[in-house]
Image (cartoon, rainbow, N blue to C red):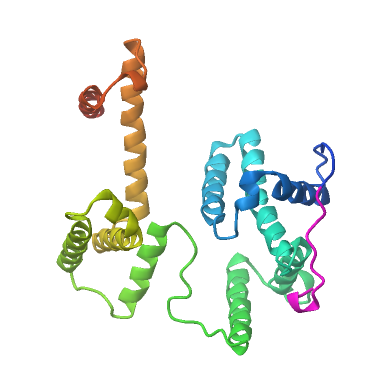
Amino acid sequence: MSNQDNKIAAPAPVQGTPTASGELNDLLALMARLRVNCPWDKKQTNHSLIPYAIEEAYELGEAVQSEDDEDIKGELGDVLLQVVFHCQMYAEQGRFDMSDVITTLQEKLICRHPHVFEAETLEDDAAVKVRWDEIKMEEQQAREARGKPKRRLDNIKAGSALMQAQDVQNQASKLGFDWEGVSGAFDKLDEEIAELKNELTDKSKTEVKTNIREVEKELGDCMFALVNVARKLNLDAEAATLTCVHKFKSRFGYIEAQLAAAGKRLEDSDITEMDALWEAAKQYERSS
């Protein structure tokens, strides 16, 4: 089916109170009902869902690492929800539906596995990988024939912003677009921080809110420049940030535990007390 055929119709909403059946069509009908009757679901767009799709993929990764079947089933369901949600909205727009997505996937899997479905024989997984890349190249040539040429940075894989930033920089460096040493990256970081400060200096909250997109751009430039510093130091920006996140969670957990031991909640404390406990948490880390 295609949009030109004008035959795309969104699934009909389920009526009454549904039950969990395990059937895909029932899930599609349930999603259609949510789009009709749930205020939050009604206001979503394909673009507004992007952060949730990324978040769910990461949570699935954590669940698989946990080896907890209930968590894994739940997170796989959350990833599937994103697919169903997007398909519902695209069907509402008359563009394509779930059956089109499934058909496209089936065609891709069949095309990329000639050693399974045709007479072609491949000896091992390394040969499979080589053949897979050849087929992807053929697919790209077909895309170019449709007027979608591939640029040098188009092979950057989807991932977190930090991962993509570092990958983009690595690819650009291979093409000669880079500083010789880390000092250039530090200079650029200082420049971007200065521009961010300049954007915020002597501005009221109202002015900052009005100009929030410019502030966002300057902040993004700072983050990108800092990733460049990490790259020049042969460090992984994503791993470094995750280390910081885990450290923060650990120290904040220490604060919460110490307050609980004193019969207090976080809400009962203040920044002075919590900051002192933060320093105590750092000392605890050094001694343990």
Residue visible at 51% across and 82% down? 150
Q: Is residue 78 visible?
A: no
Classify residue 107 as left or right of residue 71.
right
Residue 118 position in % (x across, y down): 78, 75
Magenta-drawn stretch contains 6: yes
**In the depicted structure, whether residue 159 falls above or below residue 130:** above
Residue 43 position in % (x across, y down): 61, 52
Residue visible at 49% across and 63% down? 158
Magenta-drawn stretch contains 192: no
Classify residue 115 as left or right of residue 149.
right
State whether the magenta stretch is mostly helix, strand or loop.
loop
Classify residue 218 as left or right of residue 265.
left
In-front residue for pair 193/173 = 193
Residue visible at 80% across and 56% down? 11
Residue 95: quarter of image: bottom right
- Please count the marks in the image: 0
Residue 153 position in % (x across, y down): 43, 76
Say which quadrant the N terminus sits in: bottom right
Q: Is residue 134 visible?
A: yes
**In the depicted structure, whether residue 179 falls above or below residue 40:** below
**In the depicted structure, whether residue 25 falls above or below residue 92:** above
Residue visible at 75% across and 64% down? 97
**In the depicted structure, whether residue 253 falls above or below residue 238:** above
In-front residue for pair 170/36 = 36
Say which quadrant the C terminus sits in: top left
Start and end of the magenta stretch?
Answer: 1-13
